[in-house]
Amino acid sequence: MEEGIKKVPEVVQNSGHKIAVLGLGTGKLPPTPTDVLLPILMDAIEVGYHHFDTAAFYQSEQAIGRAVVQVLKRGLIKSRDEIFLTSKLWCTDASQSYSPCPQHHTPLGLDWSMRVCFLPWEFMELPPRLPNTGIDYYTIIEDLAAAKGKAVPQILLRSIIQQGPSAVPRSFNKERMKQNLEIFDWELGEDEMNKINQIPHRRLYAGDLFVYEVGP
Ligand SMILES: NC(=O)c1ccc[n+]([C@@H]2O[C@H](COP(=O)([O-])OP(=O)(O)OC[C@H]3O[C@@H](n4cnc5c(N)ncnc54)[C@H](OP(=O)(O)O)[C@@H]3O)[C@@H](O)[C@H]2O)c1
C-alpha cells in the first residue's frame, strides 16, 4: 500500500469474509481490453484497493485474475485472501437454481469471494445523482468540499461510507484512484451530513428491467 494512504476499513460478512468498505468498480463501456486493464488493476492493488467489483459482462474478470497473480508474485500482497473479488453472472447465464454456467470459469484458478446474479442491488450503491430541480445542489457539495479542503468526489464517497454502505467507484487513473481512497482519516460532521441528506437521492435503475416472468 502506498505511503500516506490509510488502510480501508473492513466489515465482516455473515460468511466470515472481510470486505473493504471502498472497492474499485471495473465496469466500463466499451469494455477495456485485458492487457490495458491489467497494469491499471495492479496499480490499484499497489495504492491500496483490496476489493474489486467485476462481472462477466464487464469483461474484467481475466484482468483482475492476472493482476492478483502478478502482485502475489511481486510480494505486494501475501495471500489471495487479502483481496475480495465480486463477479456477476448475466441473468441468462444462471439456471433457476442460480448455479454458475460452465462458460464462466474462475480466471486463472482464483476463487470468487462473492458471485451473484446480475444485478445485485443489495450490494451496489451509487453516488447520489443530483436532480434538476432548480436548486443548485452541486453548490452544496462544492461549498463543503472547499470548506474542508477536499475534492467533490471525496465528499460524495465519504457521505456514502458514513451512512453505512460500501461503495465501488470506478477510476482507471492512478491519481484519482488514490484520491478516492483518501477519505478515511477525516469525517463529515452531523451538520454537513444533514446538508448532504437534504439532496434527494435516487437509484439509477429501478431493476424491473431485469425481472422476467419465466426466470431465471
Ligand atoms: N453504473 C451502473 O449501472 C453499475 C451497475 C452495476 C455495477 N456497477 C459497478 O459500480 C462501478 C461504478 O459505477 P460506474 O462505473 O458507472 O461509474 P462511477 O464510479 O459513478 O463513475 C466513473 C467515472 O468517474 C470518474 N472518476 C472517478 N473518480 C474520480 C475522481 N476522484 N475525480 C474525478 N473523476 C472521477 C472516472 O473517470 P477516470 O477513470 O478518468 O478517473 C469515470 O469517468 C462500476 O464500475 C461497476 O463495478 C455499476
Image (spheres, grey):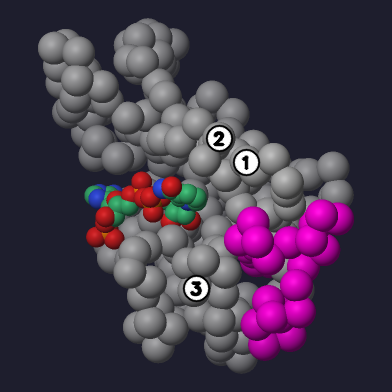
Instruction: Kindly give the residue lying farthest to the front in the view shown.
Output: 214
Residue at label 2?
A: 208
| In this rendering, position of residue 152 left or right of residue 162 | left
Q: Residue at x 45, y 36 (%)?
A: 205
Who comes first in sequence, dot 1 or dot 3? 3
x then y, percent, for residue 91: 64, 56
Q: At numbered mark 1, what does the secondary structure look like: helix, strand or loop? A: loop
Q: How many callouts does the rendering have? A: 3
The answer to whether 156 appears left or right of 26 in the picture is: left
Discs 3/2, front: 2
The kind of residue tagged 3 is Ser
Dot 2 surroundings within 10 Å: few (below 14), some, or many (20 or more)? Answer: few
Residue at 40%, 78% (x, y): give it: 37
Q: Does the segment drawn in magenta span residue 87?
A: yes
Q: Amino acid at mark 1?
A: Val
Give the Cα distance between marks 1 and 2.
5 Å
Toward the viewer: 192 or 90? 90
Residues at discs 1 and 2 in contact (Cβ within 8 Å)? yes
Tell me which numbered mark, 3 or 2, is placed earlier along the sequence: 3
Question: How far from the left and from the top, in percent, is residue 71?
Answer: 56, 83
In the rendered image, the vertical position of residue 129 relative to residue 169, given as above or below: above
